[in-house]
Structure formats: C-alpha cells, structure tokens
Amino acid sequence: MFEQLPNVAGIYAISNKANGDRYVGQAKNIRSRAQSHWRDLNRGTHRTNAARHLQKAWDEFGEENFTLEILEIINDNSSLTDYHRRPDNLSLAEHFYINQKSEYNTDKRIVRSEFNNLIEAKAWRDSPA
C-alpha cells in the first residue's frame, strides 16, 4: 500500500469503509506519515487526540476496514510563511478538509477565524511553494 503513495506534501484522509467516518491530516511527506499512522494504530499507541477516536475505531473495525486517500497534493510553503500574518498552505487546506468531513478529528480549528477568507478562497491553491 505505501509503495504507491508519493513522497510529497499534502492532505490525506484515513477512512473507515464500514461507516464512512474519517480522520483528516496534513503531512510534509504523505508516505512517511501514513506509515507512521499504520504502525501506531497496529501497536495500539495512536494518539491524534486525547479521545483516541481513530484508535478506538481501528480496534473495533480492524485494519482491513481502513483506507488512506490523498485528498490534495499541496505546495509546502511552511518554511517561507509567517504564521501570524498568513498560515501556511498545509494548515489552510487541512482546516478546509477537516471542516468538510472528519469524524475522528476533535479539533476542527486549525487556523484562526481571521483567516476564513483564505480558506473560503482556497488560497493554498494559488500560493507558490
């Protein structure tokens, strides 16, 4: 599974095939991050939030009921961005996708509300790396 994943920055979802629920995350390297998720989930040590929603679902439904989907490949500009003036592309896109659908994410606010205009405009798509 991991061999087909690119070594690029982007937004991904770990989806439960049994009920459609999903976890959304960002990564500077999607392949590496996916491997880390699967390792921790299989060990029972996954902690994306205090409630451990994804780990509990994994334990209940089993690995065979989960898939990883790349939602969008993003130009990573985090090293060039002053977060207080404009959030980086990955954070803007993650905020957008989490608030679309993400039952296993407990924190839905990735960027401050003053940047909602950038999220609505999908500004990460027009921003150079």
Image: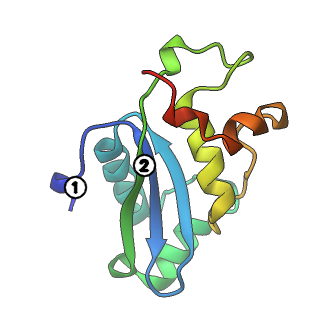
User: Is 96 drawn above or below residue 65 in the view shown?
Assistant: above
The residue sitting at 31% across, 51% down in the picture is 35
User: Is 81 drawn above or below residue 5 in the view shown?
Assistant: above
Q: Secondary structure at mark 1?
A: helix
Question: Which image quadrant: the C terminus?
Answer: top left
Q: Nearer the viewer, mark 2 or mark 1?
A: 2
> Which residue, given by chain and number where applicable, does mark 1 sit on?
2
Circle 1 Cα neighbour tier, 10 Å, few/some/many (<14 / 14–19 / ≥20) = few
The residue sitting at 45% across, 64% down in the picture is 14
Q: Which mark is residue 24?
A: none
The residue sitting at 18% across, 55% down in the picture is 4
Q: Secondary structure at mark 2?
A: strand
Q: On the picture, is 29 further left or further right than 71?
A: left
Which is nearer the N-term, disc 2 or disc 1?
1
Q: On the picture, is 94 further left or further right than 106?
A: left
Q: Nearer the viewer, residue 18 or 58?
A: 18
Tell me which amino acid carries mark 1.
Answer: Phe
